[in-house]
Image (tube, grey):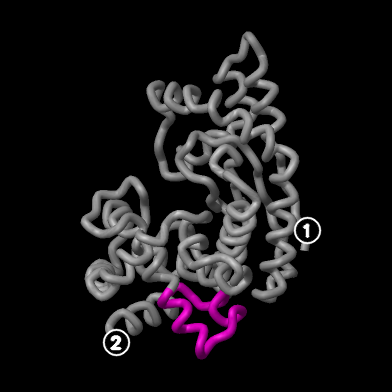
Amino acid sequence: MTVVVRDLVPAFLEFWTDPNRQWDEYAGQHPEVLNDFTRIGRTLEPERLEKALATYPELEARIRANAPHATRWIEEAAACVAPVLDGEHLDIHGIAMVGLGTSNGWVDNGTLYLAVELIPDERSAEILAAHEIAHALQLPLPESPWPGGGPLGQRIYSEGFATALTAELFPQYDLADHLWFGPGYDDWLADCESRRQEAEAAILADLDSDDDAVSGRFLWMSGQTDFPRRIGYFVGTRLIQALRRDHSWPELARWSTERAMDEVRARLSA
């Protein structure tokens, strides 16, 4: 396994400390810094850019503190996760960067992204990097690699897979820490537990939907929902934890989208 990380944080700091800094020049040289927008088909509106730029002064100390560590976080996560999934034959490509405040980490077209401005400490980094490595490996491991996105059921499986995996790898952290990449969400977890059956029924009803608004209802902070935000991560995690009683991590990582959807449907119907 080869782990290749492009570290764009120094380029951001060079841009940020330049008294004549020009965003268009910086983003033109490093288009990856726009990926947390472009990956889902959005364009960076001027007001959204201004909002991001306005947050950077208060985040500068964190960005500078994280700058020396982002590559290590990805490398250590790969070394931890790949053997569990029998995925050492796959290469990992990562990008460490300062993002636009939309997400702390994601995988797009096989590349893992970490946005260091949204990573508060080592614990969050350890969980988050392993979570994203799990995605980066689980997508290509099946005989027919998974596409990005997909219907709600596929996303529930994928997010549950990554979260349940980190919960096993790092049992010193509470489940809420794994679901939110840090502490402070015990009340949210209790709310999810209390509404679990209701959420499972709602997810089951929309399992085959490709509508982003439907996925947003259960998985995204920005989604319109009457459930606790991101409850789909919780439902998916409990589902994968149940599947782990009968299946190994290498098995679960290699299921086709059809097998995964069938298992999700069966578990939610039980």
Which residue of the protein is positioned furthest toward the bottom in this rendering?
Answer: 246
Q: The residue tagged with tag 2: helix, strand or loop?
A: loop
The vertical placement of 96 against 63, above or below, is: below
Q: Name which residue type carries label 2.
A: Ala
Q: Nearer the viewer, residue 191 or 95?
A: 191
Quadrant location of residue 204? bottom left
**Mark in the foreground, 2 or 1:** 2
- Mark 1, residue position: 2
The vertical placement of 255 against 129, above or below, is: below
Q: Residue drawn 70% across and 37% down? A: 67
Name the image quarter holding the N terminus.
Answer: bottom right
Horizontal and vertical percent for residue 3? 75, 55
Query: Is residue 130 shown in magenta?
Result: no
Horizontal and vertical percent for residue 248? 58, 84
- Mark 2, residue position: 270
Q: Residue drawn 33% across and 45% down? A: 222
What predominant SS class does the magenta segment belong to?
helix
Q: Nearer the viewer, residue 85 or 91?
A: 85
Q: Give the Cα separation between the discs numbered 2 and 1.
A: 42 Å
Decide if residue 256 is on the left or right side of residue 133. Answer: left
Mark 1 Cα within 10 Å, few/some/many (few <14, many 20+)?
few
Please give the range of residues in magenta.
Answer: 238-257
Q: Name which residue type carries label 1.
A: Thr
